[in-house]
Image (cartoon, grey):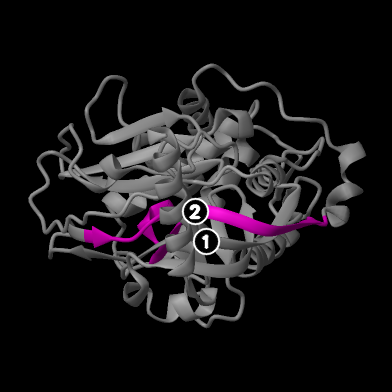
């Protein structure tokens, strides 16, 4: 009898949360994310799990980042999520401004609809060419969950040191995060990779990566020459991880990157030279072979730009940071003689058969197209 009473109270609580859900849209939330902070919301949207994205898309919202970051509640053990992720966290010795917030826990309804949703998003595109974090499907659904809203920003002192920051997801660049409670009305659309299908027969998979992907990129620096422009750029990205066993505040992990963990929003248990921890996550299952080497170059560029931006780039946004990181990734591609590289959505961003002039124009066009169309980022 007591068990039945407990179950009844849990069902009533769940129904209450659904009844109180604010029916809204992605764009309405992105207009003023802070006004939805802590509320249970209900939205219809398209979700993608790409290279460094796990988002609900809002095309046409007219903001620099037209996505809501998506997370599952802590302990959900779901399959889908981004392939890589870089998030800042205050270190134990962080001396800047820190705002802590108590968030209402969310329980995920692992219904049949959710299992379908998660499985579709976790399915990767099949390609003999290297396709970094390429999902097979985009998934549309009705989503209910807790909305965490803020203003994504980084504040620095005159020396460039970070004194405060806010935001969610990759690079802490998202002003809104949806912690999923339930999903329904699931439909899927297969991503069109037909534009790059013709190169598959000509392109062999990249050779297996060395055990140490960071060391592989150091070898790539030598291939360019440490004093060359390309060598210096790639070296800066690789050096961001520090030396073996050095405590430089960069924390590397290999796991699924899809949960909103309360411990990541408070001071960490370790110190850092500048009071900031850079939590770099890699989903090994999504980065086979040399893909991990490319991911290390990409993520290292982000850490370097966040921690010690070059002169003139102190205030760059996520669009500029992603553009620079993809260029650094291509340095690693080039150094190893890789024939092609494809990005989510089927963007051919590198083809070794292009002429020098074609490489300059085609790479720029492909990265801009990818960032604007797939990641919904603008300057």
The residue at 61%/29% (across/down) is 285
**Is 252 one of the magenta-colored residues?**
no
Say which of 378 and 357 sits in front: 378
Tell me the residue at 70%/34% (across/down).
337
In the rendered structure, find residue 180 and report the number of the disc placed on it: 2
Secondary structure at badge 1 equals strand
- In the rendered image, residue 258, in percent from the top left (x then y), is placed at 49, 43
Which of the 4 image quadrants contains residue 261?
Answer: top left
Residue 176 position in % (x across, y down): 41, 65
Is residue 215 visible to us here? yes
Find the magenta span and give its range: 165-192
* 57 on left or right of 227: right
Is the N terminus in the top left, top right, bottom left or bottom right quadrant? top left
> CB of mark 2 within 8 Å of CB of mark 1?
yes
Q: Which residue is mark 1?
A: 144
Residue toward you, 375 or 43: 43
Q: Quadrant of residue 208?
A: top right
Eyeballing the image, is 337 above or below 146? above
Locate residue 284, reporting x and y percent: 56, 28
Q: Seen in the image, is 108 located left or right of residue 350?
A: left
Residue lying furthest top: 211
Placement of 248 over or under 375, stated as above or below: above
The label number, if any, that marks residue 185 in the structure image: none
Can residue 301 be seen here? no
Sequence-wise, the earlier of marks 2 and 1 is 1
SS at mark 2 in the image? strand
Residue 2, horizontal then vertical, whole percent: 38, 34
Q: Distance between the Cα atoms at labels 2 and 1?
A: 6 Å
Q: Main secondary structure of the magenta part?
A: strand
């Amino acid at each position: 009898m007591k068990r039945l009473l407990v179950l009844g109270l849990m069902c009533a609580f769940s129904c209450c949360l659904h009844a109180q859900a604010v029916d809204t849209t992605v764009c309405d939330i992105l207009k003023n994310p802070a006004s939805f902070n802590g509320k249970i919301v209900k939205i219809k949207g398209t979700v993608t799990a790409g290279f460094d994205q796990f988002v609900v898309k809002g095309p046409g919202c007219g903001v620099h980042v037209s996505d809501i970051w998506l997370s599952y509640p802590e302990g959900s053990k779901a399959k889908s999520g981004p392939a890589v992720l870089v998030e800042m966290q205050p270190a134990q010795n962080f001396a800047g401004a820190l705002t802590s917030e108590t968030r209402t826990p969310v329980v995920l309804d692992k219904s049949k609809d959710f299992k379908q949703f998660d499985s579709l998003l976790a399915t990767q595109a099949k390609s003999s060419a290297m396709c970094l974090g390429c999902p097979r499907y985009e998934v549309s659904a009705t989503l209910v969950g807790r909305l965490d809203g803020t203003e994504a920003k980084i504040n620095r002192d005159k020396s460039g040191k970070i004194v405060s920051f806010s935001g969610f997801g990759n690079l802490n660049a998202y002003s809104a995060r949806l912690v999923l409670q339930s999903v329904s009305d699931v439909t899927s659309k297969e991503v069109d990779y037909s534009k790059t299908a013709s190169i598959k027969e000509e392109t062999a998979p990249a050779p297996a990566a060395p055990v140490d992907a960071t060391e592989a990129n150091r070898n790539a620096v030598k291939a360019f020459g440490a004093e060359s422009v390309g060598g210096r750029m790639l070296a800066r990205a690789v050096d961001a991880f520090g030396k073996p066993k050095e405590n430089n505040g960069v924390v590397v992990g290999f796991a699924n990157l899809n949960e909103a963990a309360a411990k990541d929003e408070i001071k960490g248990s370790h110190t850092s030279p500048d009071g900031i921890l850079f939590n770099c996550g890699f989903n090994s299952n999504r980065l086979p072979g040399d893909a991990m080497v490319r991911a290390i170059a990409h993520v290292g560029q982000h850490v370097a730009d966040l921690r010690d931006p070059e002169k003139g780039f102190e205030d760059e946004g996520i669009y500029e940071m992603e553009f620079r990181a993809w260029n650094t990734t291509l340095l690693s591609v080039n150094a190893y003689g890789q024939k092609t590289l494809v990005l989510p959505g089927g963007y051919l961003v590198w083809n070794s058969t292009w002429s020098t002039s074609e490489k300059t124009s085609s790479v720029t066009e492909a990265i801009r197209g990818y960032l604007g169309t797939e990641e919904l980022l603008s300057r």
